Amino acid sequence: MAIIPKITAVSYLNTIPFVYGLKHADNLRAELLLAPPADCAKNYIEGKVDIALLPVAVVPQLEQTNIITDYCIGAVGAVRTVVVMSNTPIQSVKRIWLDAHSRTSVQLCGYLAKNKWRIAPEWLAMSDYSVVDNAQPGDAFLLIGDKVFGYENHFKYVYDLAVEWREATKLPFAFAVWVARKGVSYEITDELQHALTFGVEHIWEAVSESNYMGSDNGVTAYDYLTRNIDFILDEEKHKALKKFWDAGIRIVPRSY
């Protein structure tokens, strides 16, 4: 009897090529669970899934776990959906409200605050996004994922964290990578690699089948996936991950 692996992946626009590949590639049968990045990590840590697309900040803490594919959610330039927004220049920001959906973005924001922006703001947990609509002087907001699209024209200053990281390090960035527990068969991980390749090679079809077609017939989604997201986990992104992990930044926001 064939083993059907349980896989969790991020439920954002940037993942739909992967999801398309997992659903349509002939070589892999899998049970797929979609969730925000933080919940993907939770699903994996709690043993609910065997394979996961995980925020890179959690990977060094995991035992008996390997990175298993040549694919990621990354960016070589502006990623567009991981940003700090404010009506105050970043050097004058006093408080940064942190999106709870991605630990990687929080720690990356902490890295940039220390090493590029040279600020020591108060870090606040943001679970109620209504605070974004009631910004006070000195406030900034880390926002990630699809929700960013709705705020792109609301603030005077927008800092794309992939751009800020590249300016600070001269490297691209990988926000999420595919991992599996040790013991998952090579046959399954090879099948996953082929499924992801199929998805990345069929981005337009993935958009066409998704909920992101919109009034522009998917042009905006396709443009984002081909211009802002880089899916290849290459040597430069591995260097970036090592630099990010070695920095050891640990931001723990205060509950409000």
Image (cartoon, rainbow, N blue to C red):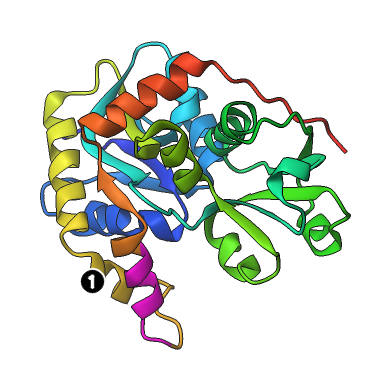
Q: Viewer-proximal residue, 16 or 145?
A: 145
Q: Which residues are magenta?
A: 216-224
Q: Is residue 215 left or right of residue 20?
A: right
Amino acid of disc 1: Glu
Q: Secondary structure at mark 1?
A: helix
Place residue 240 in its image quadrant: top left
Q: Viewer-proximal residue, 127 or 31?
A: 127
The mark tally for this picture is 1
Residue 25: where, in percent of width, then height?
Answer: 15, 55
Residue 91: where, in percent of width, then height?
Answer: 72, 42
Q: Name which residue lies at 84% across and 34% down.
A: 255
Q: Viewer-proximal residue, 165 or 141?
A: 165
Q: In which quadrant will I find the C terminus? A: top right
Q: Is residue 203 left or right of residue 74?
A: left
Q: Name which residue lies at 81% across and 60% down.
A: 130
Seen in the picture, residue 25 relative to 154 is either above or below; the reply is above
Q: Main secondary structure of the magenta part?
A: helix
Say if the magenta span includes residue 187.
no
Seen in the picture, residue 243 relative to 28 is either above or below; the reply is above
* Residue marked by disc 1: 205
Place residue 24 in its image quadrant: bottom left
Q: Is residue 256 left or right of residue 182?
A: right
Q: Name which residue lies at 24% across and 23% down.
A: 184
Q: Viewer-proximal residue, 185 or 121?
A: 121
Q: In which quadrant will I find the N terminus? A: top left
